[in-house]
Image: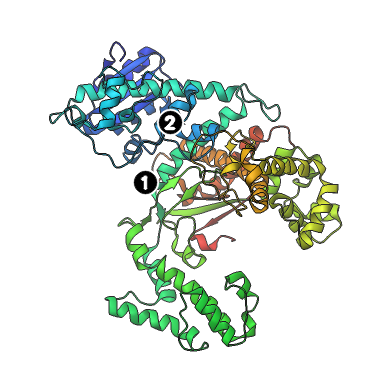
Amino acid sequence: MTSGPTVLAGGGVVAALRAAGVGRNEPLAVVAVGAGLGLASGRGGWAVPTGPDAAGVVTRIEAELAPRWVWWSVHGSPAALVAGGLRPAACWDLAAVHRLLHGGRRDDPAPVWAGARGLPPPAPVPTGGRPVGRGQLDLLAVAEEAETGGDLDEPVRPDGQLRTDWADERWTDPRWDGPAGDAARTLRRAVRWAELALTVRDAQEQRLGAHIDPRPRPGPTGLAVLTARAESAAELLARELECDGLPIDRPTAERMIAASAGPRPRDDADDGSIRRARDAPVLAHLPGGVDLRNPASVRSGLRAVGIDVPDTRSGRLERLRGTHPAVGALLDWRKAERIATTYGYRWLDTFVGPDDRLRGSWQGSDGAGGRMTAQAGLHNLPAELRVAVAAEPGCLLVRADLGQIEPRVLAAVSGDPALARATAADDLYAPVAARLAVERPVAKIAVLAAMYGQTSGAAGQALRQMRAAYPRALAYLDAADENGRAGRDVSTFGGRLIRTSSVITGSAGPGNSTSSGNSAGSGDWAAGADGATVAARGRFARNAVVQGSAAELFKAWAVTVRHALAADRPAAGPPGGIVLCLHDELLLQVPAERAEATRQLLHDTLTATAGYWAAGSGVRFVADVTIVRRWSEAKA
């Protein structure tokens, strides 16, 4: 332990921090525990016994000093602070930055610490363990206690790794100290944990600062550090979206569910009757005994009426809709069945709260491409239910969608001057079509084939034309493909490490990755990999360097919008805010009188974000912005 942190009353913490020199953007680590807060900066450590007002104390510090908050993960102990109303301007999320630097999905404190200290990644900490008191330590804890001389207050083992009980943060539970607990000791540990967070942050920033920018940009801060800040803020935004939710017009949702799935069942028997009624229009066209929820049975039933297909995917069946009434009925049934089983009354009752807000868990980054992800249907809401996403009284929704974002990002990251010139058009595919001397749909196929590695049919011919017209863009993609095939890691434009060796056999997109460790990329696996795996990893890397970079640009824009909205907060009335991030789309709810100003704010923040992110590239980024009352009114 250190010589001991200063103990501050909640009311005097702002004055003490100011006196110590903590100010705007100064890193200030915070750890929230039941007894209060542990704070640490490069100028000292402070234990703050707050009782239940921890969020209020941190919010006062934010209002007066606006530091850059440092935490292990906003989804850990700071989650309660955000739920309590904390909305900081700037933060540094160690877990988010670790994923940026090291790739993979694992971001618990043990590998985060090890990565910052240059140590090998430790084995995962077992989950499900219960906090135990002195005299009740499990065998692993006893062994570690012997390693550190029995000092439970020392978080780092002699080998440099974190102790297990610190890595899984069991020390935050007062029961570790025995039945009575020891609040003062827990606060001292919170300060120590905050001090370690600062150590990790400094190491991460130093490593990011050594990253060579893809091209010169204005300002003293490199793109990798700016990306880390944006990724940290995106995790904070994800936690805010969890807390705040998406506004839902419940009566409209009920009506739309009823229109597709039938009325709300009174009991199990009624549920079965409604289900049979939903099935009847399809079964009327098929022989008896077909189970609509069994693809093999459906395929057999279709074959019996003269429709022989290798599978029953909707994309394949849609082309056959007019050949037999069973096909159209089946496709319509699938939409209704999806709402009934996934987005029906149970979904509504489970995820839409009494305040008519839809809430689900969020992550600021998936494990590979870096896109934001959400549960509870927030990223998969059927088009039929978008009408139920409606602005609350006195407000409007402002929807902004980045136009043709991936080909524009390709132009920026590859430095292809011809493709960069094409981005000057609102519709990028029009100048591409003119350069290739093809129709616009063919030009679109050519661009997508280049990014996704499709080489057969019309896409193959289009790809050959792309190579001649945009050689630097294709060389950039080919280099990523080659690295992926060889099992070498690739990086996004902002510096995110993407591990190609984690791709599942036969997968082709950045979402199909299972990496969870920190093992270095290697070509050792390639000798024994089959051709499908090698090709899949090449396609994965080819797309990941574009899709991952696009995700970084989108999140940088989103958090810039978040910051601008906070600065433009009205003195009275409801504040405006982001209520949904969907791939390349932002959905905001703002006071009706601020809707037009918000439209301009979205354009201005995109220009500002692209100004540093794609500095010197000459690439133009565009957003389609519409003001609506219901999400369904926006152009799809």
The residue that label 1 is drawn on is: 243
Report if residue 427 is visible in the image. no
Q: Quadrant of residue 253?
A: bottom left
| Residue 300 percent coordinates (x, y) | 54, 81
The quarter of the picture where residue 212 lies is top right
Residue drawn at x 36%, y 27% as measured from the top left: 30
Q: Quadrant of residue 225?
A: top right
For badge 2, the amino acid type reads Pro
Q: Residue furthest left?
A: 180
Q: Left or right? Give the position of 271 relative to 476.
A: left
User: Where residue 466 sits: x, y (%)?
Assistant: 81, 50
**Position in image of residue 171 (x %, y %):** 27, 29
- From the top left corner, tell me how far across and down residue 578 is, in percent: 47, 46
Between 602 and 185, the residue placed more toward the observer is: 185
Q: Nearer the viewer, mark 2 or mark 1?
A: 2
Of residues 60 and 523, which is closer to you in this image?
A: 523
